[in-house]
Amino acid sequence: MNAIEQLKQWVKESDNIVFFGGAGVSTESGIPDFRSVDGLYSQKYDYPPETILSHTFYMEHPEEFFRFYRDKMLALDAKPNAAHLKLAELEAAGKVKAVVTQNIDGLHQAAGSKKVLELHGSVHRNYCRKCGKLYDARQVLEMEGVPRCTCGGQIKPDVVLYEEGLDSATIQESIRVISEADVLIVGGTSLVVYPAAGLIDYYRKDKLVLINKSATPVDRRANLLIQDSIGQVFSQLEA
Ligand code: CNA
């Protein structure tokens, strides 16, 4: 049986699938990832993206942080692709229990997924650091320079920057769903960013599916390894 047929069968048989994904899930929606050849690491900036998207850089150079953030992280016209849409369908069909994502783009929710655990937050939530007032991504996009609240406070995206801690309730729930999963599908992630990448260690069964275009440190542990485009693979699955 080829890999896609095997995956189709596991999906057909299971009602407890968890998906764990990263930036590669959204490249087919036109949002660049970090580590692909055309990802943000290969584009020319004065600093690497992980430096700009760090807490220190945000505090010390907010103007430059927001220039990069608006330009590269706020892809508000992007639409869900076949992978996002199929995951939402599989959830509605009672097969997928949760999507655990490192992405901050909100495309899983846009596709209709209900249980989405956003390990690194979301560009769609922004709050004033002084009074807590909430702003949406469009408002932040349309402000100039460092976004300011009506009270004068600085608006910060609810995104986990490098050096910042992850939300512990989100981590706990991610550990729970992964440790209880029957099938774990991991896709579109280089699996090098911790602590997120370490979550797959909580999976206990023997149906670990890895769908990624390039090699990852976990390839040898996968029970099924598919080196292909994630949208291509998901479009072949049946809900
Ligand atoms: P990454 O390190 O950039 O790795 C992406 C991986 O996906 C690479 O191994 C690629 O080979 C693979 N890939 C790219 N496109 C596809 C595709 N169509 N099909 C299959 N595989 C593909 O991204 P990670 O998520 O692993 O790194 C973690 C960071 C990147 C997270 O903190 C994210 O928040 C951050 N990020 C998020 C977005 C977003 O929200 N869309 C965009 C860019 C970066």
Image: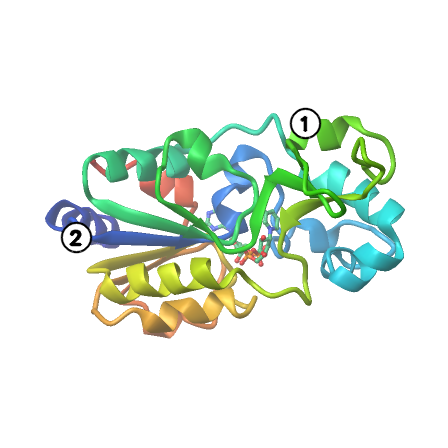
For the N terminus, which image quadrant?
bottom left
Callout in the foreground (2, 1)? 1
Amino acid tagged 2: Trp
Q: Name the image quarter holding residue 113.
A: top left
Q: Name the residue under label 2.
A: 10
**Distance Cα–Cα, label 2 vs label 1:** 40 Å
Q: Which of marks 2 and 1 is nearer the N terminus?
A: 2
Q: Circle 1 sits in a helix, a strand or a loop, which is it?
A: helix
Q: Circle 2 sits in a helix, a strand or a loop, which is it?
A: helix
- Is residue 229 something one can see in this rendering? yes
Q: Residue 138 carries which label?
A: 1
Question: Which residue is more in the foreground, 192 or 112?
Answer: 112
Q: How crowded is mark 2: few (under 14 residues within 10 Å), some or many (20 or more)?
A: some
Left/right of residue 80 with respect to residue 140 in the rendered view: left
Residue visible at 56% across and 40% down in the picture: 105
Image marks 2 and 1: residues in contact by CB distance under 8 Å: no
Residue visible at 17% across and 52% down in the picture: 10
Question: Which residue is more in the foreground, 215 or 144?
Answer: 144
For the C terminus, which image quadrant?
top left
Left/right of residue 132 with respect to residue 59 in the rendered view: left
